[in-house]
Image (spheres, rainbow, N blue to C red):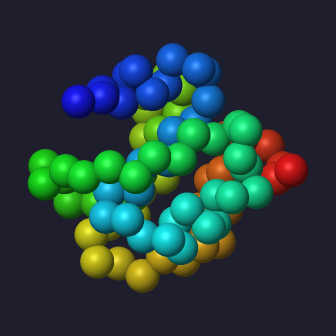
Amino acid sequence: MTRSADLLREGRELLLDLVDRAEVRDAAAAWTGRVNTVTARTDRVDVDALLIRPDGCVAWALPTGQDLATTTLVRALGTWSGQPA
């Protein structure tokens, strides 16, 4: 089992895709190298995806079952990780 703290050690944002939604990973593809994207499984939260800052704070969340408005994820990625590559 890998803990989210272990995934944050590199000092990058962490995008956790908790239900294997390709559109979440696709939206973050332009930030490869600055954002670690991980697909994981859990039954303990009511979200489908989380963007976690290197300090452990949640910068963005996608509630369970909600349609992904990629603009909100892209805006959060731009805020915390700079312009896409």
Position in image of residue 42 (x %, y %) = 19, 50
Residue at the spot x=40%, y=52% of the render? 39
From this viewpoint, is residue 47 visible? yes
Which quarter of the rendered picture does the N terminus lie within?
top left
Q: Residue furthest bottom?
A: 67
Q: Is residue 72 left or right of residue 22?
A: right
Query: Does residue 4 lie above or below 85 as drawn?
Result: above
Residue 9 placement, left or right of 56: right
Residue 78, horizontal then vertical, whole percent: 73, 51
Note whether residue 59 is visible. Answer: no
Instruction: Identify which residue, 70 or 20, lies in the foreground.
Output: 20
Horizontal and vertical percent for residue 5? 38, 22
Between 25 and 68, the one lying in front of the other is 25
Residue drawn where x is 51% and y is 39% of the image: 14
Residue 54 in the image: x percent, y percent?
A: 54, 26
Q: Residue furthest top?
A: 9
Q: Residue at x 51, y 17 (%)?
A: 9
The correct choice, above or below, for 38 with respect to 27 in the image is above
